[in-house]
Image (cartoon, rainbow, N blue to C red):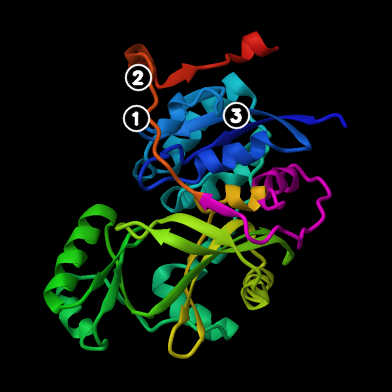
Amino acid sequence: MNKLPVTIAVTGLNNSDNPGPGIPVIRSLRESRYLDVRIVGLSYENLEPGIYLDDMVDMVYSIPYPSLGHETLLARLTYIHEQEGLDVIIPNFDAELFSFIKISDRLVSMGIRTLLPTQEQFDARLKGKLAEFGEQFHINVPKSVTVFRADELGQALQLFSYPVVVKGKFYEAYIAHTPEQAQSYFYKLAAKWGTPIILQQFIRGQEFNITALGDGKGRLMGAVPMRKTYITSNGKGWAGVSIEDENLLEMAREVVSQMRWGGGMELELMKEDSTGDVYLIEINPRFPAWVYLAAACGQNHPDMLVRLALGEDVEPSDEYEVGKMFVRYSWDMICDMSRFQEIATTGEMAIRPLELVQ
C-alpha cells in the first residue's frame, strides 16, 4: 500500500520529568500504516529534549509563547509554512490551544489542517466548570470551587474537609492537609499559571485515565483506558497498564458524543475505595503524554487524527490489547553544543532539510 506523504507540525517536545505529548504523538505517527510523515517540531524552549531527537523530528522551529498572542503565533506559522509546506498541525499543550483555535480558520485558508475543539467546547471542560459539566451530562464529579483572589481562599476552604486538592489553571495539583498548605500551594500555582485556582474534593481511591479521539461530529473514534501503576511525586504516571472496563469506555463515549468533541482528549478519573463510584476529576483537551500506549495496543490515535483532519474516511476503532504496560525511563542524549547555539540564535534547526529530501 502506498503511503500518503504528509508534513505534520507538532508541539510539546519537552520530554523530561514532566513530559509533553509531542514525542509520543510523533512516535505514533512514525509507525503509521497509512502516512509517510515528515515531522516539523515546534518548540517554546531551546532545551526541549525533542529538539535533539534526530529519529523523531526532521526540522525544528521555535515559536512564540502563547502569552504573546495569536497574531504573533500566526505570523511565525506563516513563515514556517512558507519553508516547509505544512499539511497538519497537532498542538499538544492546554495553554496554547486558545491561540490555535482562534487562528484555525486562517490556517485552513493557508492549506493547513487541524482537528480541534471549538472555543465553546474547550471552555466547557475547564477545571473551574467541571461541576456544571458533571451536572449537564449526569457524570459524577468531585465538589469544586474556583478561587480568583487570595482573600477568597479562606472562605472557600471552609466548604471542604481535609485533605483538599489545590489545582492550577492549566497544570499541576497538590494535596493540602492544612489551611496553611493550601495557601502556600495557592500562591505557588498562581505565580506559575495565573488565576483562577481550583479547590477540589479529595477522592481516595485508584486513578484511571482514558485517551480518546473524537471526530467533531459526535463519534468516538477510539479510546483506551489505563490504570496508573507508578505515580511520581509530581503526580505524573510513570508506569501504567491498559485495562478492560466498559464503564470507563462508556463514559468516554458519553463525553465525546454529547460534546461533539473534535481532536484528542484525556479523561482523568478516580474510583473511590469506599463506594466503588467513579468520579471524573479532569478533562484534558489534547492527547496525554502516554498516548503511545494506545498505538501499542492497536489504536493509533495521532494517525487517525491526521487522516480525519485531511478529510479522509476513517473508521472508528473499538478493539485494543489489554495488559500492555508502559514504563518511562531517563536517557542522557549527547549532542554538540553547536546545535543548541543554532536553535537559540536562529530559531530553527535542520536535521533533514526539505531541499535534501526532495
State yes or no: discs 2 and 1 in contact (Cβ < 8 Å): yes
Q: Toward the viewer: 332 or 18?
A: 332
The residues tagged by marks 1 and 3 sit, at their Cα atoms, a distance apart of 18 Å
| Mark number displayed over residue 47 | 1
Depth order, front residue of 41/86: 41
Give the residues in magenta: 297-326
Bin the neighbour count of mark 2 within 10 Å (Cα to Cα): few under 14, some 14-19, many 20 and up.
Answer: some
For the residue labelled by badge 3, is the local secondary structure a helix, a strand or a loop? Answer: strand
Q: Is residue 122 above or below residue 66?
A: below
Mark 1 vs mark 3: which is more N-terminal? 3
Residue at the disc numbered 3: 39
Local packing at callout 1 (Cα closer than 10 Å; few below 14, some 14-19, many 20+) is: some
Do labels 3 and 2 touch, CB within 8 Å?
no
Of callouts 3 and 2, the N-terminal one: 3
Classify residue 284 as left or right of residue 67: right
Q: Looking at the image, can residue 90 be seen?
A: no
Query: Eyeballing the image, is 335 above or below 286?
Result: above
